[in-house]
Amino acid sequence: MTTPLNCRNYIDGQWLSATGEATLESRNPALRSEVVATFPRSVINDVNVAVTAARQAYQSWRKVPAPARAEYVFRVGEILLQHKEELAQLMSREMGKPLTEARGDVQEAIDCAFYSAGEGRRLFGQTTPSEMPNKFAMTVRMPIGVCALITPWNFPVAIPCWKAMPALVCGNTVILKPAEDTPACATKLIEIFAEAGFPPGVINLVHGVGEEVGKALVEHPDVDLVSFTGSSETGAFVGATCGRTHKRVCLELGGKNAQVVMEDADLGLALDGAVWGAFGTTGQRCTATSRLILHRDIKEKFTAMLYERTSKLRLGPGTDPNTDIGPLVNELQLQRVSKYLEIAREEGAKVLIGGDIPNEGQLKNGYFFQPTILDEVTPKMRVAREEIFGPVVALIEVSSFEEAIAILNDTNYGLSSSVYTRDINRAFAAMRDIEAGITYINGPTIGAEVHLPFGGVKHTGNGHREAGTTALDIFTEWKSVYVDFSGSLQRAQIDNRS
């Protein structure tokens, strides 16, 4: 064990203690006795100070040329490269994901930095002809103001960067409120932003509890935009509050993603995708494969293959290079997953493998849950409809491609989807007919690339997309500009032709 990191808030270019003396702990989910970090339980006054700093900094930051703003973000990417392994090790200790995945999390942040920096020399608007002579018309992107970024624990470096980097390039100032389970990762990340030289107040960090700090940011009258990633239930509160107060809001919420395996699929490839999609990050991804929709002709064979592969997966600390599946993030998540196994049994699902909390060896000291396959699941069961957010996959049998797509779409969510088939006609029909923001053909449901839009439909969000150029539409407002050099009054929207 190492000495716990003492995290503080970062406001107006300074590391500050919170107003009160209350603190919280972040513990290693693979070894619950180990305290990774302590962090302040900030209060409304701390939020007010951060918002004031961000509001003041916005007035000068928005006037910095976009290419120059982007150079700061590019420097963040360079520094992240230097600290990649350090951050990955910390992430594995603090939230439990295996080191290979933690390195990927940091790499995604690096990719985002370099991609977002490139947008600083674009931020394209449009020029268009005017309907009148001697008149010029164009559109430009304008920053919005102070952005509150409320981020989850499952991607504690990548997701804050997905939000902060395009926001900063666009000319906004930001306040990061990280998850209570990953304050150390957030602190180290903001140290890197500080090292990159951002002016005071441009980027701020406030630790605390979501119901206190997060709520205060969402309700604050001087916060112009809220970008939230988390549960659909909390997202509904955030969206309603922002609607009442006329704030811009971006919601990236839950998923109940499915992988379809047709009778003509490459079963070995589909197996690789199913195992990675269902059990990667211990199933704690909004894009995780919660449902496997299997054609009846291959179901028995594919289920046997999946059982064999799952039986060989190794549970353990994320820092152990031999680990395939790390722990769940905390006791609440462990009990949530365990409760869903009770529900599955009550509903008549068959537990093929797993389904329990292991109690042997070092596993009893952490929040581990066995990788689990549920068979004989019907589409109306709760385990087929509600997000479990753990290493649990439900098998559903179908007799046709059309039935598979109908069941895939029969959910309140619509984030990611996957179809394994060799039939090009089916592939294109899937791309057309699946109700989801992301569709993979012959690939797993998890794995995003930073230059493509990320987000979903239905209860998965509110229509915005993170990453790619679409992120610019979250963090900018369109302004139409007219320049009339005719020297006389010209009236648009008036019938000038009579």
Image (cartoon, helix red, strand yellow):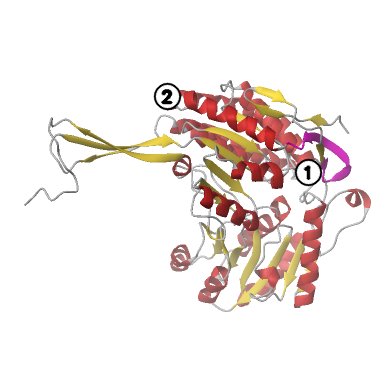
Residue denoted by label 2: 65
Residue 262, position as x, y percentages in the image: 57, 70
**Relative to residue 354, is residue 430 drawn left or right?**
left
CA separation in Å, label 2 and label 1: 42 Å
Q: Is residue 28 magenta?
A: yes
The local crowd at label 1, few if under 14, some if 14 to 19, many if 20 or more residues have their Cα within 10 Å, is: many
Q: Is residue 123 left or right of residue 135?
A: right
The type of residue carrying mark 2 is Pro
Return the x and y of residue 210 as percentages of the image width and height.
70, 45
Q: Residue at x 75, y 30 (%)?
A: 19
Residue placed most toward the observer, 307 or 232: 232
> Who is closer to the viewer here, 130 or 48?
48
Q: In the rendered image of this protein, does residue 52 appear above or below residue 491? A: above
Amino acid at circle 1: Gly
Whether residue 370 is visible to the viewer of this picture, yes or no, is no
**Region rendered in magenta:** 27-42
Badge 2: residue crowd in 10 Å (few <14, some 14–19, many ≥20): some
Answer left or right for 384 relative to 241.
right
Q: Is residue 143 visible?
A: yes
Residue furthest right as drawn: 361
Residue at x 58%, y 66% (from the top left corner): 412
Mark with earlier residue (2, 1) = 2
Q: Secondary structure at mark 2?
A: loop
Magenta highlight: main SS? strand
Which of 424/177 is in front?
177
